[in-house]
Image (spheres, rainbow, N blue to C red):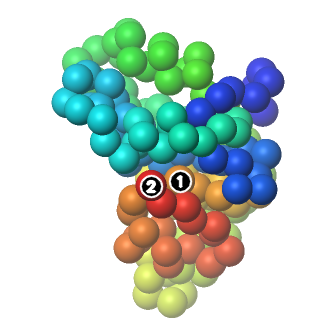
């Protein structure tokens, strides 16, 4: 799972919390000086190890001017990197199959992010409740 705990999130009884891309984008915007918002406020008020999935890193790279952008290094050093491994891949496959059968399929990247949190057994901090709320067994937290 990576190095020891990183500081900055609310434990609320959890040893690790996975951060969604929505949170990272909001935090990045707030860090650029657009004011204190809910993401940076949440980081100030709470403390626990936070993880970032490989998929969230990919989504961040997509939105940055270049893949060597300092914000990427900042997030990778501050948060535990959560790779896609066999458990995540298996979780993803089960999610797609189950949600497709119900006619409730969500976006591919959201499925991978949810699968990562489920495989790790941790909640996901997001404001994307509408889509991710369809994922059975996924514990969601908002900010």
Query: Mark 1 Cα within 10 Å, few/some/many (few <14, many 20+)?
Result: many
The residue depicted at 58 percent of the width and 22 percent of the height is 78
Callout 1: SS: strand
Marks 2 and 1, the one that precedes in the sequence: 1
User: Residue placed at 68% from the left, 27% from the top?
Assistant: 6
Q: Position of residue 88 (x, y in %)?
A: 70, 51
Residue 45 makes an appearance in the image: yes
Whether residue 96 sits left or right of residue 56 in the image: it is: right
> Along the horizontal axis of the image, is 20 left or right of 30?
right
Name the element at disc 2: loop
Which residue does the numbered mark 1 point to in the structure image?
125
For the residues carrying marks 2 and 1, which lies nearer the camera in this image?
A: 2
Q: Residue at x 57, y 65 (%)?
A: 140
Dot 2 corresponds to which residue?
143
**Residue 130 percent across, percent down from the top left:** 38, 73
**Camera-side residue of 9 and 22:** 9
For image coordinates 39% across by 59% down, the residue present is: 127
- Looking at the image, the residue that sits furthest to the left is 34
**Residue 66 position by quadrant:** top left
Q: Do residues under tags 2 and 1 come within 8 Å of each other at their CB atoms? A: yes
Q: In which quadrant is the C terminus drawn?
A: bottom left
Measured as percent of width and height from the top left, residue 118 is found at 70, 60
**Residue 72 at x, y = what percent?**
43, 19
């Amino acid at each position: 799972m990576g190095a020891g705990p990183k500081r900055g999130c609310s434990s609320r009884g959890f040893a690790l919390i996975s951060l969604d891309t929505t949170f990272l984008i909001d935090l990045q915007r707030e860090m650029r000086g657009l004011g204190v918002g809910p993401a940076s406020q949440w980081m100030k008020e709470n403390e626990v190890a936070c993880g970032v999935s490989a998929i969230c890193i990919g989504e961040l790279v997509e939105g940055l001017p270049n893949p060597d952008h300092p914000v990427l290094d900042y997030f990778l050093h501050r948060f535990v990197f959560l790779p896609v491994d066999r458990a995540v891949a298996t979780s993803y496959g089960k999610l797609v199959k189950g949600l497709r059968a119900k006619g409730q399929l969500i976006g591919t990247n959201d499925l991978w992010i949810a699968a990562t949190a489920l495989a790790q057994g941790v909640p996901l901090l997001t404001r994307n409740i509408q889509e991710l709320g369809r994922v059975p067994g996924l514990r969601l937290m908002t900010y």
